[in-house]
Amino acid sequence: MEKTLNNKAWWMVLPVLLLVAFSAVIPLMTVVNYSVQDTFGNNEFYWAGLEWYAEIINSSRFHDALMRQFFFTFVILVIEIPLGIFIALHMPKKGLWASLTLVLMALPLLIPWNVVGTIWQIFGRVDIGLLGAAMDAIGIDYNYTQNIFDAWATIIIMDVWHWTSLVALLCYAGLQSIPDAYFQAAKIDGASRWAIFRYIELPKMHRVLLIAFLLRFMDSFMIYTEPFVVTGGGPGNSTTLLSLDLVKMAIGQFDLGPAAAFSIVYFLIILLLSWVFYTAMTNYDKGESQ
Amino acid sequence: MTLALQDVTLVVGRDVHIHPTTITLEPGTLNVLLGPTLSGKTSLMRLMAGLDRPTTGQVMWNNQDVTGVPVQKRNVAMVYQQFINYPAMSVYNNIASPLRLEGLSDKEIDRKVRDTAELMKLTPMLDRRPLELSGGQQQRCALARALVKGADLVLLDEPLANLDYKLREEMRSEIPKFFEESGAIFVYATTEPSEALLLGGKTASLFEGQVTQFDETLEVYRRPLTATTARVFSDPPMNFVSVAKAGNKLLFGEGQNVAAFGKLSTLEDGRYIAGFRPNHLLLEKPEGHFLSFGVEVTVSEITGSESFVHVIHDDDRWVSLVHGVHEPEIGSQIKVHINPAHLYVFDENENLVAAPEIAVAA
Amino acid sequence: MAEIHLKDLAHSYLPHPSGPADYALKKIDHVWEDGKAYALLGPSGCGKSTLLNIISGLLTPSEGQVLFDGEDVSRLPTEQRHIAQVFQFPVVYDTMTVYDNLAFPLRNRGRDEETIASRVKDIAEMLELTPDLNKKARGLTADAKQKISLGRGLVRHRVAAILFDEPLTVIDPHLKWMLRMQLKALHKKLNRTMIYVTHDQTEALTFADKVVVMYEGDVVQMGTPQELFERPTHTFVGYFIGSPGMNVLPAHVDGSEAYVEGCTVNLDRGYRGLSGSNLEIGVRPEFTHLTSGREGLPVTIKRVEDIGRFKIVRADFFGREVNITVPDGQPISPDANRIMFDPNHVNIYSDGWIVNGEAA
């Protein structure tokens, strides 16, 4: 209904289309090109067909990285979504405190990703880091460069610290848009705190939750900078997530063909999963309204 | 400037928002679009304004095809149900804003703003911000902005719906004055039949995306050509009863059986639907030839000077509007009476076949 | 069900109110009878919402008490007051079915499912919601949603009062008629104490046994619809109730005669000692008649608005607008140039407040 008849809008979009073409479409095509060819340098290429794809999909290296990636994303979603909701529910609704909390919550989101990595890398160090030294002082043997569990715990806590705010802020916006009459009606109906959450807050928040979930899923599935700075994928390969592995393959070993195939497969996995989540959630939404 | 919609339709996806509509609005007229929520009032206005392009058909201004010409290029003003003003500007600057866009001289702007403010009784508030004003004053400010630019077409989409009842009543009696002075085409959307009657002018009744009738307001009220129009244009709702005519007998439900008389005797045999307004359904039978029905009382509402007595006849809900205080017991059986001269008779396709004579109508 | 006593109640949003102007609700002392329907009527900002919020427990009054059946509830939170409320915009639990919506207050109070089922069935029947019981609440129309809101209040056995906060705002005129009529019928059937807040005189008058007219934080009159129509105690009530409102003209009064712009108006009562104050006569357009000839007040007819059921004649009397309503079917004589009043419907006001005369 709200469509306009102004066809000039297309001209306005054109620069963006050009930019996207140069920054995304053309590089992507290059990658597709690499993924089906083999090279030994000197700009000589040989047709390899789907060989690299077969190799990647069957390689245990890829499987391991993928499993680690799923584990990481699963854990952070399970922590960040409920925690974000919980925080949003307890944020002050108006007054000075509300603005102050909003600023505080937004802070982690404003820090560049490599800086977040550096902060935690130093924070966790046993010699000079506050966290590491404190753990050491109370007698916990903590060392993220040696211990697999410690390394995982560090990158997960770091991600939760960095991104829970985003979920919380989105939920907060959703909660703020609920008219007061709903809460008053619920009180009159004698609803418990849980019932208010389950029947008013959650249903009114579910659209922003869908966005929060998708954003966190895609972002965490592509995470690179922070774990690269903190653990570099170690100890061993224990925290080598998909993107870390891809970069190792492409730049460390310069296996352009397999790396390109890896990229494409990686890209398709994200696309597919996002689509699956999105349709599942919007279908649920439709089902609700009938 | 004459605005004509010719066979205009609006289809969005699979939903038909506006069925083929042909309607001509003359300059200097007030045209009311009357219909319930979602009957297509806003859609029709958007088509007139050029905010939406009709799926088929043409929009003509003075016989010139302007279909597809965007709203910015037409001289149109619009006022909405919500009070829409620039919150950071004074009332003066709000009213002046459309004139500044036209690039008039400051002197000219000042004169027009002050004239319009005077007309809208806003002169003492010119330096205030819109949000410091009452709802009624905010809407006056929005109206002033629409009027000041001398638009050829002024669209008012339920402009009084968010105001208090009493304020609404006052503004309603003022609106005809504004439009008399401007000479533009005014289009006014409302859900309330009483508002259409108070505004006068012409009325288009709308139902489910269809303009069911377009004529002088009182003519539509007195001679609704279909039962749908009669339903749209009645407040309290019109009462209906089904009638069968056989020979010189009229058969109402419950086997009631009355000799046909008055204009009813001229109808052909068959099934009919008779409609009558609540103020013609009486609790006491006056002298003369009246139809009487046994009904059950649902409830009565008393306004102080009048009573609405709600009753059920077979499965039809009726309401009687009578002077004075009448409160028959709920659930009791009473007789109600109607002068057949007050009946609107519709055929089986709900088209009007007989209306009350003007002298006794309304 | 309960009797509501508003005892020396007043409210100011300021911490230290100094004058009457600082009060959003000026001091009142009312007893509202058990089982009656009351309407709070007034323009926006008149204090009706403040009063409603005090009764519902959203606001704690700065002075005085609210007593339900003698029990002071002024400081109890909403949930402990046993009230029900229907809001301006329908509040339903979107994800639940209509049945679950209606059952919700009972489930929260730990009733067994069997009791709930029979109760919900009864209420749904009463509100004509039975066919919708298994539908999701959010797909329904606004009027059905309002009925659900009301139903959630009705299912509970112990409800002191049902509050309505402009419940018909978002409902179309035709459905408004139906819903209003159903509300009224329900009240007659259940005899629960109901309080209805609105700015719409028709809604207030048709719904309530007693209408409480509010203006600038004050209750200016509380009475039956008939009293408000026939004997408004303040010129504001005369103006606010009735469409068009009461005609009010400055006058002198002497005995059983009033003088308006030098013309004599006969009264059916005698008034004494009224010369000093600011006097006015008030007559409703319904009791004002057009005539021609020498008797009555001279007017010029400016406009006749035919609104179907009756006509409103707008006339000018020495620069003041006077409205006359002429019933349907009654012709307006082209040489009508005077107005007459029904002597028994002419009220006298001094400084805005009605003066009760003595039987002449």
Image: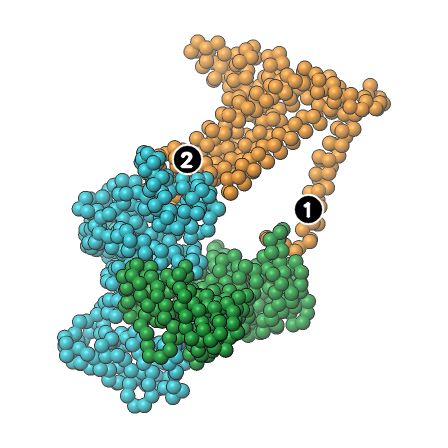
The kind of residue on which mark 2 rests is Phe
State the residue at coordinates (41%, 73%): B258
The spot of residue A27 in percent (x, y) is 74, 32
N-terminal of the pair, mark 1 or mark 2, is 1
Q: Secondary structure at mark 1?
A: helix
Name the residue at 48% across, 9% down.
A141
Task: Classify 10 Å Cα crowding around label 2: few (below 14), some (14-19), many (20 and above).
Answer: some
Q: Compare residues A119 and A75 and report the one nearer the observer.
A: A75
Q: Quadrant of residue C113?
A: top left
Chain letter for the part of the structure drawn in green? B
Residue type indicated by callout 1? Val
Q: Examine the rendered structure and indicate whether residue B22 appears above or below residue A52.
A: below
Say which colour chain A has.
orange
Mark 1 surroundings: few (<14), some (14-19) or many (≥20) residues within 10 A: few
* Residue B261 at x, y percent in the picture: 44, 78
Disc 1 with disc 2 on a shared chain: yes
Q: Is residue C163 visible?
A: yes
What residue is pinned by disc 1? A13
Image coordinates of residue B222 in percent, x first then y, are 47, 74
Residue bearing mark 2: A197
> Drawn colour of chain C?
cyan
